[in-house]
Image: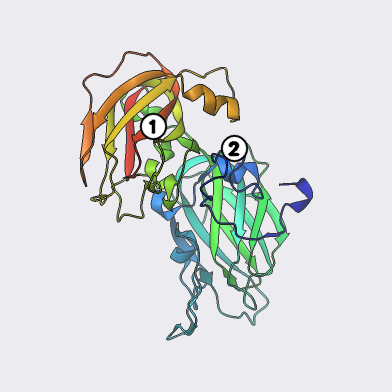
Amino acid sequence: MAPEAEGRNVPDRPRQRPKDTPMPTIESLNADVPLYARTGINLASAGLGARGLSSTNEFFAPLERMLADGEPVFIEGKFDDHGKWMDGWETQRRRDGGHDHAVIKLAAPGRILGFDVDTRHFTGNYAPACRIEAASTREVTEETSWAQILPHRALGPDGHHFFRCESFESWTHIRLHIYPDGGVARLRVFGVPELDPTHDGQEIDLAASLNGGRILAMSDAHYGDYNRLLAPGRGTNMGDGWETRRRREPGYDWMVIALGARGVVERIEVDTAHFKGNYPDRCSLQAADMLNFGDGLTDALVTDSMFWKTLLPERKLGPDAIHDFREGLEALGPVTHVRFNIHPDGGVSRLRLFGRPA
């Protein structure tokens, strides 16, 4: 996204790709979206554990809807006791000269790279402006010290509004101010989770989103929400995970993942929860230590992943089950990236790569 476009309404783009377009990578997927929104983890995701703690008002729509992972929807003719049902957070019209705000506990402490203040479907009732503060604390009290990390920014109706964050500190909570009132469909807070120092020397899920694991590229992601592959807990339904289209040509589907920490993988868990007639027949994993590669992704990295060393040889998978693989893993030493292969296609709810940070 060009720098001058930051903060402007950005039209929603479909994530699924036509069959014959190039492989999705962080460089090509949703090219209109800033890089931090394509590579950062949404620390305000309810699915990752973020939650709204308080708000000055939520008369028309509750704060919790603003943190939902799904895309906002508009349901024609749907009303509740307070008026038109809206998919987001919406306050009543202020008549006192003040403004509204809400406090959100992030899913994990981390550095914030940028925001998407999304007003989709809010046309005559959107919040005209916003400001964001942050705090690093165990618990929010009246004595909590707040730092401004996004100054006042104008918002428009029915669209994404991307804003870069220049703060380099780690934060646990944010406070979103809207001026003077109105609605926000979704708030995304893109960042990098801070690895819990108490994990030092202990086994953790090296690929977990909350530990900084990120999906960099995939052969296909036609169904579901592929980012949920690295989310905590088990999938809630068949849409809560990574599922590819039915493959009608030779080959198999794959995904490239950057681990949250360089480490030695000691145990692998592949969960096909809710995938009963569409689970992969087999899976395998490759891995590499790309410590000196940097944080970017190029076509060269995707091509290189085809030749990474085998971490887990092909193993059979079954429907709607957790598959634990700890025997037969190759001793590759510390790795930073993995390539998760599913043969030939299908759906996986969660992938866990347990090991110890190096």
Residue 168: x and y, percent? 63, 36
Side (left or right) of 246 relative to 220: left
Q: Quadrant of residue 262?
A: top left
Q: Helix, strand or loop at disc 1?
A: strand
Q: Residue at x 53, y 28 (%)?
A: 302
Q: Quadrant of residue 130?
A: bottom right
The amino acid sitting under disc 1 is Phe
Residue 217: x and y, percent? 51, 36
What's the distance in space between the residues labelled 2 and 1, CA to CA? 33 Å
Q: Helix, strand or loop at disc 2?
A: loop
- The label number, if any, that marks residue 169 in the structure image: 2
- The label number, if any, that marks residue 195 in the structure image: none
Vertical placement of residue 108 versus 54, above or below: above
Q: Residue at x 68, y 42 (%)?
A: 166
Side (left or right) of 85 relative to 204: right
Question: In this rendering, which labeled residue sits more in front, label 2 or label 1?
Answer: 1
Nearest to the observer: residue 279 or residue 240: 279
Nearest to the observer: residue 52 or residue 135: 52
Which residue, given by chain and number where applicable, does mark 1 sit on? 340
Q: Residue at x 66, y 53 (%)?
A: 162
